[in-house]
Image (cartoon, rainbow, N blue to C red):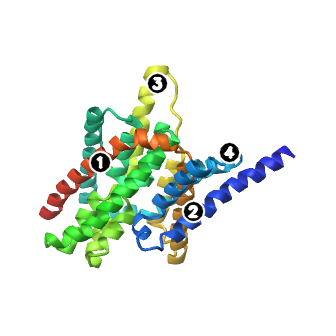
């Protein structure tokens, strides 16, 4: 009887995140929210729900499952966005530039963390999100470093909002500098945080410009693989030196690599690929609901302001540097 009651609440918790996720996706059909994106909307709803109605404690197991397990499954499915052959054959220059973007992001966040003396976990997650691929990178890295759920949620919220503002700004800034579409595409792909933000900004370019934007962006997404394993290695070394213990390996990253390899060598039918993409988005949004519910308003006030300043500073400098890089390629 207890197991049946627990299972019912567990499923109800998952359905709870599903309903709010669908609501968030529907809300993004509205003019202003369409630019913000479903991830940020779902996070915001989760935060508002907790502050106004409190955390739905009986549903916690299912909500936690969505925030952790479904998020990892979504990252695995994210591998279907990668074509390793295309990136390695045509995007090797973008990979080198992407490495530079990642190194710059981590270095800037490290320096600004020393200056602001703020939450190191959030700053590290924002560095990953800025340098690699936004929410997906933050989610993957947070599992490796065992970040708190509220730190992960705050980081994803900041990266989603700031990245969206920058993407919208690009559509106005681009024409002012009379850039050709390819240069604009490279600039967008190298500097913006999320794939969705690159698509949003790249919408003002022609097909060639959009293709270059996606190639340069996906080259950075590809780098999530080696960066994740490098972080695992350094954490494992540090933990072994301190306690002699072993680091927990997030095995979902191996499945992420496997899916990327499969997608690179096996032709996935368009309809199936589109369905997988929609499922990936839905699972990510469901996870955002769970993460949003984990954040008390007090944490946002105490933890978010200085990381926001650091993120804006890093993003502005990254945007300026990549603008000049894209102009000379």
The residue identified by callout 1 is 102
Which residue is nearer to you in this view: 27 or 170? 27
Q: Residue 115 location in percent, x, y?
A: 26, 34
Label whose residue precedes the other's in the sequence (3 or 1): 1
The residue tagged 2 is 21
Which label lies toward us, 3 or 2?
2
Determine crowd level at label 2: few under 14, some 14-19, many 20+ residues with C-alpha closer than 10 A: many
Q: Residue at x 49, y 44 (%)?
A: 297
> Within 10 angstroms of label 4, few (less than 14), some, or many (20 or more) residues?
few
Q: Does the CB distance between marks 3 and 4 fall below 8 Å? A: no
Residue positioned most to the right? 1
Q: Are marks 3 and 2 in contact (CB under 8 Å)?
A: no
Q: Secondary structure at mark 2?
A: helix
SS of the residue under disc 1: helix
Instruction: Single out the mark in the foreground, 3 or 1.
Output: 1
For marks 2 and 4, give the one nearer the viewer: 4
Report crowding for label 3: few under 14, some 14 to 19, many 20 or more residues within 10 A (C-alpha): few
Residue 22 versus residue 97: which sits nearer the camera? 22
Q: Nearer the viewer, mark 2 or mark 1?
A: 2
Q: Seen in the image, is 310 located left or right of residue 268? A: left
Residue at the (29%, 78%) spot, across then down: 207
Q: CA distance from mark 3 to mark 2?
A: 40 Å
Let me know if residue 222 appears in the view.
no
Query: Where is mark 3, residue-wise?
Result: 240
Label whose residue precedes the other's in the sequence (2 or 4): 2
Cα separation between marks 2 and 4: 19 Å
For marks 2 and 1 on the same chain, the one whose residue lies earlier in the sequence:
2
- What is the C-alpha distance between the residues marked 3 and 4? 36 Å
Residue 175, above or below 49: below
Q: Which mark is residue 57?
A: 4
Q: Foreground mark, 1 or 4?
A: 4
Q: Are marks 2 and 4 in contact (CB under 8 Å)?
A: no
């Amino acid at each position: 009887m207890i197991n049946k009651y627990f299972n019912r609440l567990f499923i109800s918790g998952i359905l709870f995140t599903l309903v709010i996720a669908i609501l968030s996706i529907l809300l993004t059909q509205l003019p202003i929210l369409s630019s913000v994106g479903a991830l940020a909307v779902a996070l915001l709803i989760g935060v508002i729900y907790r502050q106004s109605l409190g955390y739905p404690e009986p549903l916690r197991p299912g909500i936690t499952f969505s925030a952790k397990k479904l998020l990892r499954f979504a990252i695995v499915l994210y591998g279907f966005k990668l074509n390793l052959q295309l990136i390695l054959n045509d995007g090797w220059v973008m990979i080198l530039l992407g490495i530079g973007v990642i190194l710059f992001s981590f270095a800037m966040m490290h320096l600004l963390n020393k200056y602001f003396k703020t939450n190191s976990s959030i700053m590290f997650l924002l560095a990953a999100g800025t340098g690699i691929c936004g929410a997906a990178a933050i989610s993957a890295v947070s599992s490796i470093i065992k970040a708190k759920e509220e730190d992960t949620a705050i980081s994803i919220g900041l990266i989603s909002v700031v990245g969206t503002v920058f993407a919208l700004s690009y559509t106005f800034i681009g024409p002012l500098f009379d850039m050709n579409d390819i240069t604009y595409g490279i600039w967008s792909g190298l500097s913006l945080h999320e794939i969705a933000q690159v698509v949003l900004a790249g919408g003002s370019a022609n097909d060639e410009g959009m293709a270059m934007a996606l190639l340069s962006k996906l080259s950075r997404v590809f780098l999530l693989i080696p960066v994740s394993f490098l972080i695992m290695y350094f954490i494992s070394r540090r933990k072994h030196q301190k306690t002699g213990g072993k680091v927990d390996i997030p095995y979902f990253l191996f499945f992420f690599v496997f899916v990327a390899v499969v997608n690179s060598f096996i032709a996935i039918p368009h309809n199936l690929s589109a369905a997988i993409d929609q499922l990936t988005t839905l699972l990510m949004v469901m996870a955002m609901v769970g993460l949003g519910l984990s954040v008390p308003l007090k944490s946002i006030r105490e933890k978010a302001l200085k990381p926001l300043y650091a993120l804006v500073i890093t993003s502005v400098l990254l945007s300026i540097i990549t603008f000049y890089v894209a102009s000379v390629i």
